[in-house]
Amino acid sequence: MASTPLAIDIASTSLPSAKVSNVQELTADNLAAEWEHLLGNLGGLRGEQLRLAGLPAIIGPKTLVIRFPDCYTAAYDVCREESCLEQIRASLMQRTGSEWQVCVELLPSSAAGPVQPRRLSTQELLQLPLFRTAAEKLGAELIQLDPGFFPGTAHRGFSPASADPRDDEED
């Protein structure tokens, strides 16, 4: 299935007015933490769909590319819609104070391997809102990470209905 990248020229589209706060430059060094922050702002289903693409790439000045493996065509179709792109651009504008171009691509099957979450460094983890707040407000320290722990990845297969309420009871 051949697909062409969808690029939106932000100069020709109007962004909803968003108050610029907590301006943070987006760089390769802080991309993982800032992307998690953006996904949290988008929330719910949209954030989870974008998470399927893995970490986006900064391919040029103020240009972000989100690449979906070909097994996520439904998520790709939703995320390349103008309403989703507008939300991403507005969130980037609010966070960075700059306008960004956002491209969404569907990788050909030969280029798409399974998306493996990248293990974040201690410094990157401490930039995530949960860890940062725990460190700042509670004086928490990051001591050890369990193998396979990747914050920001959904736990597939878990649902509240499948949880055993007896697990919460104390003996």
Image: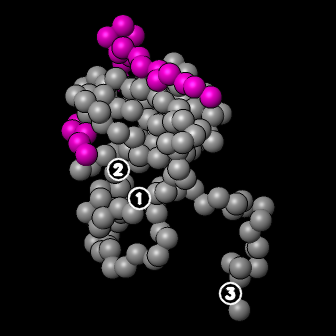
Q: Residue tagged by mark 3?
A: 170
The answer to whether mark 3 and mark 2 are in CB contact below 8 A is: no
**Which quarter of the figure has residue 96?**
top left
What is the CA distance from the residue labelled 1 to the residue labelled 3? 36 Å
Q: Position of residue 46 (x, y in %)?
A: 56, 36
**Count of numbered circles on the image:** 3
Of badges 3 and 2, the one in the foreground is 2
- Closer to us: 88 or 22: 88
Q: Quadrant of the C terminus?
A: bottom right
**Which quarter of the figure has residue 49?**
top right
Q: Position of residue 154 (x, y in %)?
A: 57, 56
Residue 40 in view = no
Q: Is residue 98 left or right of residue 113?
A: left
Q: In this rendering, is residue 126 above or below 32?
A: below
Q: Earlier in the sequence, mark 3 or mark 2?
A: 2
Q: Earlier in the sequence, mark 1 or mark 3?
A: 1
What is the CA distance from the residue labelled 3 to the residue labelled 2? 38 Å
Residue located 49% across and 57% down the image: 116
- Closer to us: 64 or 112: 112
**Which quarter of the figure has residue 126?**
bottom left
For label 3, the crowd category at 10 Å Cα-Cα, with few meaning under 14, some 14 to 19 and many 20 or more, is few
Q: Residue tagged by mark 1?
A: 118
Q: Position of residue 84 (x, y in %)?
A: 51, 26
Amino acid, disc 3 = Glu
- Closer to us: 128 or 20: 128
For label 1, the crowd category at 10 Å Cα-Cα, with few meaning under 14, some 14 to 19 and many 20 or more, is few
Helix, strand or loop at label 2? It is helix
Residue lying furthest top:
12
Q: Residue tagged by mark 2?
A: 32
The answer to whether mark 1 and mark 2 are in CB contact below 8 A is: yes
Magenta stretch mostly in which secondary structure? loop
